[in-house]
Amino acid sequence: MKWDFGSAQRAYGGASVCGDAVFIGPDEPGLVAVVDGLGHGPEAANAAHAFVKFVELHRAGPLDATLHEASRSIAHTRGVAAGLVQLSRSERTLRFAGVGNIEVKARCREAVHPVCASGIVGRPLRRVTVYEYATFPGDTVALMTDGVSTRFELCDLDLRQSAQVLAETILSRFGKHTDDATCVVMRCDIDGFASCV
Ligand SMILES: [Mn+2]
């Protein structure tokens, strides 16, 4: 089971430093992180990069434990909102856990509607729920920071395009100009593209 990934990002006000960050891990299970450092500018970027550095080194563990441990590890920063996806190609599952304002949009055979825990990674966290879904060819999932409007559905887009083109399209059409904006798209097996119903 193959996954195609794409990501697009834009800094607030055309700044050179973006307070959002993305991590797309290389291995099985594959870990994907979308991170929004609180506010914007260098301090936000520091927090987001500290989080990415942590998950890079701890990418195999349960997602809720990773978020709790990351929260302690980056307590010296401003803190972040973060969404984590763990893809198991062998089990054909997708797990999600998130804290704060990270949006998930999905066009999948199984309904995918996870809810992020409230709070800030970098401050003491309460319980974080890990959602698990079976995955099927054609499943498409987008993770976005709150710099991207949620007023669209994946079905409004041509989902046969590559994940990279989809991420860039979402950012250019629905990115806000009032915040850093990031979108990551992942899609399972383009050959098995499932049309919208
Ligand atoms: Mn933001």
Image: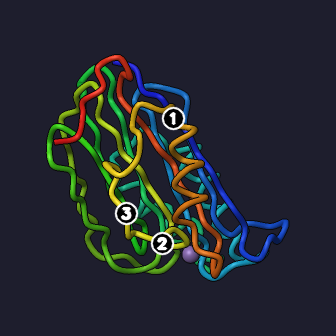
Identify the residue at horizontal 41%, vertical 40% (top origin): 158
Image quarter hosting the N terminus: top left
x, y percent for residue 99: 39, 69
Nearer the viewer's eye, disc 1 or disc 2?
1
Question: Label 2 crowding class (10 Å Cα cut-off): few <14, some 14-19, many 20+?
Answer: many
Badge 1 is on which residue? 5
Which three-letter amino acid code belongs to the residue tagged 1?
Phe
- Circle 3 SS class: loop
Residue occupying image coordinates x 54% and y 49%: 55
Nearer the camera: disc 2 or disc 3: 3
Locate ligand 1 by image quadrant. Answer: bottom right
Q: Residue 152, labelled with which disc? A: 3
Q: Dot 2: what SS? A: loop
Residue 193 in the figure: left or right of residue 113: right
Question: Which is more N-terminal, label 1 or label 3?
Answer: 1
Quarter holding residue 13: bottom right
**Distance in Å between CA atoms under marks 2 and 3:** 27 Å
Q: Is residue 177 above or below residue 70?
A: below
Spatial CA span between label 1 and label 2: 25 Å
Q: Residue at x 40, y 30 (%)?
A: 29
- Of 52 and 126, the residue lying toward us: 52
Q: Is residue 89 above or below residue 132?
A: above
